[in-house]
Amino acid sequence: MALLISYTGQDTVPWVHAFRDELPEMDVRVFPDEGDPADVEFIAVWQHPHGGLKPYVNLKAILSCGAGVEHITSDPDLPEGVPIIRLVDEAVVHDMCLHGLHWVLHFHRGYHYYAENQRRSRWQVLPAVLPFKRRIGIMGMGQIGQRLAEMLSILQFSVAGWGLNDRQLPNGIKYFSGAESMGRFLSEADILINALPLTPKTKNLIDANYLSCLPRGAFIINISRGGIVNEKDLRKSIESGRVEAAALDVFAAEPLPQNDPFWTNSSVHVTPHIGGINYPASAAQVMAANIKRIQRGIAPFPVLDPRSGY
């Protein structure tokens, strides 16, 4: 019985140590030195080569090393009947909320203007807006979206959420659901935060039509996945002034190509997908708990729902 770690582009040594601490009886191996593939019952992956899961005929679970699972589901040779377990790590959730909060405060107080004024040696106090008059719209009210909404509500911002399905939110947080309410939701968002998962239903969801629903001079913060906000349409919206500025942590193509116009656009703040950092110690603890559940005959959580895509 073995656990195989396959984490493309990252040092796997901290992951090996973390898993061995959590699962001392488990044989922990690192791809591509997996030994006999028949020994592998669990695999913790990030960007594993497509088609590379087929040799593991005794696989009981595929565990994502990050919040997203499209790097797994995009594999056309994905083994049938093997559960894909999403990573919901409290440390990542907290990091992503702090990242979103940082950019809300940045745009709310106009720090992007003050940074430019510093470059020009200009001393100028800009008009300020009371928090309860700043409308924050959050797309995607899963664990991250709800937590961020609660944090912003405590800070007295006017917060609304949008999702594909109906749900109950804490008092004081307005909620919109379904495509028919999207236009109204966007029209009331001075700052729009994307916390949606990337699924067939959300791919290129925010296009030129929906961007035109935003108040003129709105801000966009993308913390979840690229490919949901149409990047070509976003560039045009920034050029037209419909969107004043954007903080983008995720992109349709990553790493962001060096010739991409976002790099040199002074209205766009680019970060390299660091909104939520995967800490091996905390992530391995969550993933090991699911392995132990499976070993005890208990269903792991959360398992990817193929119908919803998350």
Image (cartoon, rainbow, N blue to C red):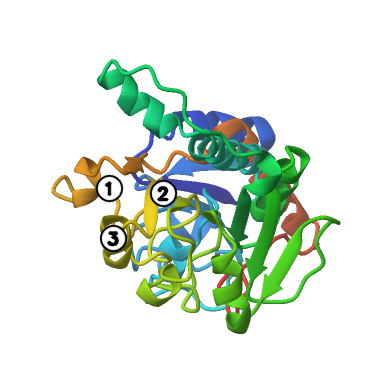
**Residue 2 point in image, percent of width and height:** 56, 49
Placement of the C terminus among the 4 image quadrants: bottom right
* Secondary structure state at the residue bearing disc 3: helix
Comes first in the chain, label 3 or label 1: 3
Residue drawn at 78 percent across, 70 percent down: 167
Q: Disc 3 to disc 1, how far (Cα)?
A: 27 Å
* Three-letter residue code for mark 2: Gly
* Secondary structure state at the residue bearing disc 2: loop
In terms of depth relative to the viewer, which is nearer, 272 or 160? 160
* Three-letter residue code for mark 1: Pro
Placement of 233 over or under 47, stated as above or below: below
Disc 3 and disc 1 in contact, CB within 8 angstroms: no
Placement of 9 over or under 293, stated as above or below: above
* Secondary structure state at the residue bearing disc 1: loop
The answer to whether residue 137 is left or right of residue 66 is right
Q: Residue furthest bottom?
A: 180
**Residue 70 point in image, percent of width and height:** 45, 65
* Label 2, residues with CA under 10 Å away: few <14, some 14-19, many ≥20: few
* Label 1, residues with CA under 10 Å away: few <14, some 14-19, many ≥20: few
> Which residue is tagged 3?
240
Q: Disc 2 to disc 1, how far (Cα)?
A: 31 Å
Mark yes or no: residue 184 visible.
Answer: yes
- Nearer the viewer's eye, disc 2 or disc 1? 1
> Which residue is tagged 1?
255
Residue drawn at 39 percent across, 33 percent down: 112
* Three-letter residue code for mark 3: Ser
Residue drawn at 40 percent across, 77 percent down: 209
* Label 3, residues with CA under 10 Å away: few <14, some 14-19, many ≥20: few
Residue drawn at 58 percent across, 71 percent down: 82
> Which residue is tagged 2?
35
**Residue 143 point in image, percent of width and height:** 69, 54
**Residue 196 point in image, percent of width and height:** 55, 62
